[in-house]
Image (cartoon, rainbow, N blue to C red):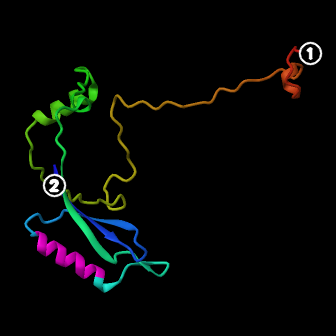
Amino acid sequence: MKTITLDAEFADGIGKSHHLKFKHFDPTKTADQVKTALTKLTKIGLFEKDGIALFKEVLHAKVIVREVRTIFDDKEEIEKPANDPMNVMLETAGALPVVEATIAKENPQPQSVKNSKNTGQIRFPEDFTITEDQQKTRLVDQNHPAANGSGTAGYQ
């Protein structure tokens, strides 16, 4: 990645220097065009701090070209275990073809029980069994220490 920055140095109203940087500078601009634009910045007088003009005079400007190039990155080459369930699932899903799904609408025909011919008879399949679910209850001996709420049950 290449970044071109213009670094302009200005003198403020009391002689101190200040830098103003413009990232993504257009390198096709000539030195005269840049100096003219920076001089206009000093004339408009928009930038002041405590009554002192920050950009009173253009001192100099330079172009900084910064190029960042990755040679290698160990973080990107971390291998995942082959038997990782997520990797297996993703590889399997990637190998499957994409199929367009169609949605089928069902329009069930409601039937009223009142209009049915066999309202008094219900037929169950032969292998149908009905079981009762009964809760098991435990009786606690009233003489047992836990029954009276002491909770010590033999621990004194």
Looking at this view, is 72 or 78 the one in front? 72
Horizontal relation, residue 33 to residue 120: left or right: left
Q: Start and end of the magenta stretch? A: 31-42
Work out which residue is located at the far front of the displayed protein and give it.
15
Above or below, 154 relative to 54: above
Please report the residue visible at 19 percent of the width from the left and 77 percent of the height from the top. 37
Sooner in the amino-acid sequence: mark 1 or mark 2: 2
Determine which of the numbered discs, if any, sits on residue 103 in the image: 2
Residue type at the position of mark 1? Gln
Q: CA distance from mark 1 to mark 2?
A: 71 Å
Residue 34 lies in the magenta stretch: yes
Please report the residue visible at 15 percent of the width from the left and 55 percent of the height from the top. 104
Determine which of the numbered discs, if any, sits on residue 6 in the image: none
Task: Point out the image quarter for the C terminus.
Answer: top right
Tell me residue 100's x, y (percent).
9, 49
Q: Which residue is mark 1?
A: 156
Looking at this view, is 135 or 30 the one in front? 30
* Main SS, magenta residues: helix
- Point out the frontmost of discs 1 and 2: 1
